[in-house]
Image (cartoon, grey):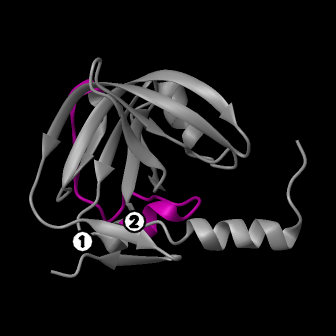
Amino acid sequence: MSRPATSDHDRFRQALGHFATGVTVVTAMEEGHPVGFTCQAFTSLSLEPPMVALAPAKSSTSWPRIARAGAFCVNVLSEDQEAVGQAFARSGGDKFADVDWRPGPLGVPLLEGCLAWVACELGIVHDAGDHELVTGRVRHLGVGAGGPLLYYRGAFGRLAR
């Protein structure tokens, strides 16, 4: 499939940037070491059975490591976790160095201070252009308190109260 002209590509990004999303960090354990990445492309998928979906970029170096683990956690970031979102959006380095976390169900890292977390077994992975569309079978979950961290028009933000 051909890619749209650059101006079409930029316009697509601009238009979709007007859709506010929550910010998550997807985590897993690989050979005893935590791995993770920031992901805005996350949604609930099914109530029965409980499932979620996310769309990691094929260029991600963290996603293949998480996929091999077979289980992952989607940590929904709170409004005071912008630094966490930025840290996990970077490629390389020890993203967990300044982040408080604990082992959770399925052995997945749970980030402290999150609004919610969803521990999943890897489901089906579909090809989706320059991303993959991934389903997760929800096995455990929990909720915290506070307001959400949002991503809108290329920047982090918070809900106005």
**Which amino acid type is marked by label 1?**
Glu
Q: Does residue 16 lie above or below 49 as drawn?
A: below
Residue receiving disc 1: 79
Give the residue at x 23% y 64%: 78
Give the residue at x 23% y 73%: 80
Residue lying at the far bottom of the rendered structure: 160
Q: Does residue 70 lie above or below 26 as drawn?
A: above
Give the residue at x 47% y 28%: 135
- Magenta stretch? 85-106
Q: Circle 1 sits in a helix, a strand or a loop, which is it?
A: loop
Q: Circle 2 sits in a helix, a strand or a loop, which is it?
A: helix
Magenta segment includes 100: yes
Residue receiving disc 2: 85
Based on the displayed image, in which of its 4 quarters is residue 12 positioned?
bottom right
Q: Position of residue 90 (x, y in %)?
A: 54, 65
Give the residue at x 40% y 37%: 28
Answer left or right for 154 relative to 1: left
Q: Nearer the viewer, mark 1 or mark 2?
A: 1
